[in-house]
Image: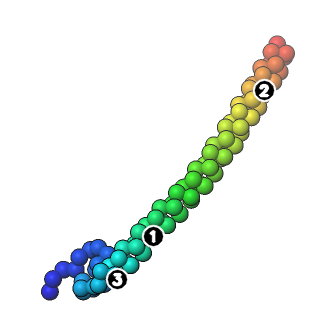
Amino acid sequence: MQPKELNRGSALGGRMVSPTMKAVVDAVWAVWSISVSIYDYIHTNAMEERIHTLESAITVHQCIIGMLSAGLLALVTYVLLRKH
């Protein structure tokens, strides 16, 4: 028993096929590969846009938290200095 090849031809059982059938299989394989690449590109782009939006929201929240912390520190400092 010979090992099967691990390529597109293995789906055909290693049999001899007509050149037309081989061309059809190659064309379908090419269209499939291109379609998968486009799908991956679109979904990767969409994910990157969502990540960028989240990064912007996190930056805004960090700035707000920083300002609130500074305000709280100023208020505590004012209260402590006023008591003395």
* Tag 1 secondary structure: helix
Q: Quadrant of the N terminus?
A: bottom left
- Image position, residue 17 (x, y; %): 28, 85
| Picture layout, residue 7 above or below residue 69 | below
Q: Residues within 10 Å of mark 2 (few under 14, many from 20)?
A: few
* Tag 2 secondary structure: helix
Q: Which is nearer the N-term, disc 1 or disc 3?
A: 3
| Picture layout, residue 27 above or below residue 43 | below
Q: Which is nearer the N-term, disc 2 or disc 1?
A: 1
Q: CA distance from mark 2 to mark 1?
A: 60 Å
Looking at the image, which is closer to me, 9 or 49? 9
Task: Give the farthest residue toward the right.
Answer: 82
Q: Residue at x 57, y 53 (%)?
A: 45
Label 1 amino acid? Val
Circle 1 sits on which residue? 31
- Image side of residue 40 versus residue 11, left or right: right
For residue 1, say whether it is visible. Answer: yes
Q: Foreground mark, 2 or 1?
A: 1
Circle 3 sits on which residue? 21
- Image side of residue 26 versus residue 78, left or right: left
Q: Residue at x 69, y 43 (%)?
A: 57
Q: Residue at x 85, y 15 (%)?
A: 82
Q: Are marks 1 and 3 in contact (CB under 8 Å)?
A: no
Q: Quadrant of the C terminus?
A: top right
Task: Give the farthest residue toward the front.
Answer: 20
Looking at the image, which is closer to me, 10 or 19? 19
- Image position, residue 21 (x, y; %): 34, 82
Label 2 amino acid? Gly
Circle 2 sits on which residue? 71
| Picture layout, residue 66 above or below residue 17 | above
Looking at the image, which is closer to me, 17 or 36? 17
- Image position, residue 22 (x, y; %): 32, 79
